[in-house]
Image (spheres, helix red, strand yellow):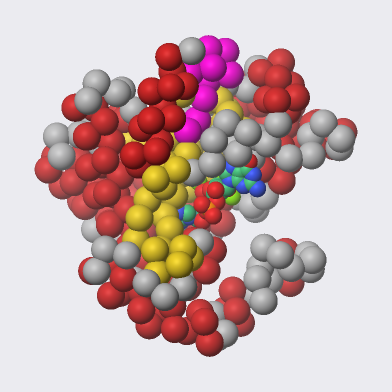
Amino acid sequence: YSAKSSAQPLAFYDAAQDAHSPRRLMLMAELGNAIRQNELVLHYQPKVDLKTGHCVGCEALIRWQHPKLGQVPPFEFIPMAEMTEIIKPLSEWVLVKALEQTKEWHRKGIPMKVSINLSARNLVDYDFPLLVERHLKNNDFPAQSLEVEITESALISDPERSLQIIKRIHDLGVRFAIDDFGTGYSSMAYLKRLPLSTLKIDRTFVSDMLNDEQDEMIIKSTIGLAHSFGLNVVAEGVEDEETMQHLAHLNCEIAQGFYIAKPLPAATFEQWYIQHNKR
Ligand code: C2E
Ligand code: MG
Ligand code: MG
Ligand code: MG
């Protein structure tokens, strides 16, 4: 059973239920070790400026290089990690790896910005801003080159506390983006209080925008809303040239998607970047 290949509506997907499948239970039991034994890797997916075509940043996306199962995608272990405390060391690992890799690119003269994904539990954890502060310092990392992506659903468990924690991280100079925008339940009244720089439009709207007028309308209104609040817009899930052109026409600033590049291992990403930004 896979959440992604299932034809059922998303509302039927029950992560808690799925967590009891033998494969998931095994993965959960092994995850702590996987972090310690370096089986996790970050892949990097470029974000390009729709005006210049240049790559202006990347999103770090986790994969598990399992010794027996091969590459395990995040939807098979992140939802379960989020149900337990293990999401804390996991997110810290992601933070450290992303900062180290990006700092390495800075040393090579590549002015990269990196985005990481955080979970609900990280956003109610008063230690997390301290970790971010410490790791920024340890890596002598310019905070403005780090962005945190958070989904609306990650905010609902304790919105007030999440707001405090987000503000503390933001005070360090880190930028924030709302991920998968348009699929959650947060109110505008709450969202306007968050120190956001960016809205990322969920790919379910982007993938069909050329055929579905309602999706296009949602995208247009989201771009208008974002701009009136002074926010940048990233469209995720751009899979063809026409969609990319149309997004540029609608004044969307940044695109991300398989048409540009899939998430790539660090070395491959670096080669892609050098080739791409030459043009
Ligand atoms: P997300 O943050 O919304 O990441 C975008 C997902 O869309 C990625 O899937 C990416 O590979 C995929 N994608 C990008 N462009 C396209 C496209 O053009 N078409 C299609 N069909 N898909 C595209 P991935 O890497 O499997 O990650 C899935 C989700 O897992 C992420 O969604 C994020 O919520 C979570 N995730 C990934 N890495 C991390 C992590 O380090 N920490 C946490 N907490 N969550 C993570
Ligand atoms: Mg994301
Ligand atoms: Mg997303
Ligand atoms: Mg998504």
Does residue 118 appear to the left or right of 8 in the view shown?
left
Instruction: Name the one closer to the observer, 80 or 39.
Output: 39
Question: Can see residue 229?
Answer: no
- In which quarter of the view is residue 86 placed? bottom left
Does residue 168 appear to the left or right of 56 in the view shown?
left
Question: Which residue lies at the image location 66% right of the left edge and 43% below the top edge?
Answer: 203
Residue 193's place in the image compared with 275, above or below, is below
- Residue 51 is covered by the magenta coloring: yes
Residue 146 % position (x, y): 33, 36
Question: Which residue lies at the image location 66% right of the left edge and 68% below the top edge?
Answer: 3
Instruction: Name the one closer to the observer, 75 or 39.
Output: 39
Residue 155 % position (x, y): 50, 54
Residue 260 % position (x, y): 57, 31
Instruction: Name the one closer to the observer, 1 or 12.
Output: 1
Residue 187's place in the image compared with 85, above or below, is above
Residue 135 % position (x, y): 18, 46
Question: Can see residue 73?
Answer: yes
Instruction: Name the one closer to the observer, 244 or 85.
Output: 244
Q: Quadrant of the N terminus?
A: bottom right
Residue 102's place in the image compared with 85, above or below, is above
Range of magenta residues: 46-54
- Residue 266 is covered by the magenta coloring: no
Question: Which residue lies at the image location 43% right of the left edge and 58% below the top edge?
Answer: 63
Tag count: 0
- In which quarter of the view is residue 171 placed? top left
Does residue 145 appear to the left or right of 197 in the view shown?
left
Question: Which residue lies at the image location 60% right of the left edge and 39% below the top edge?
Answer: 258
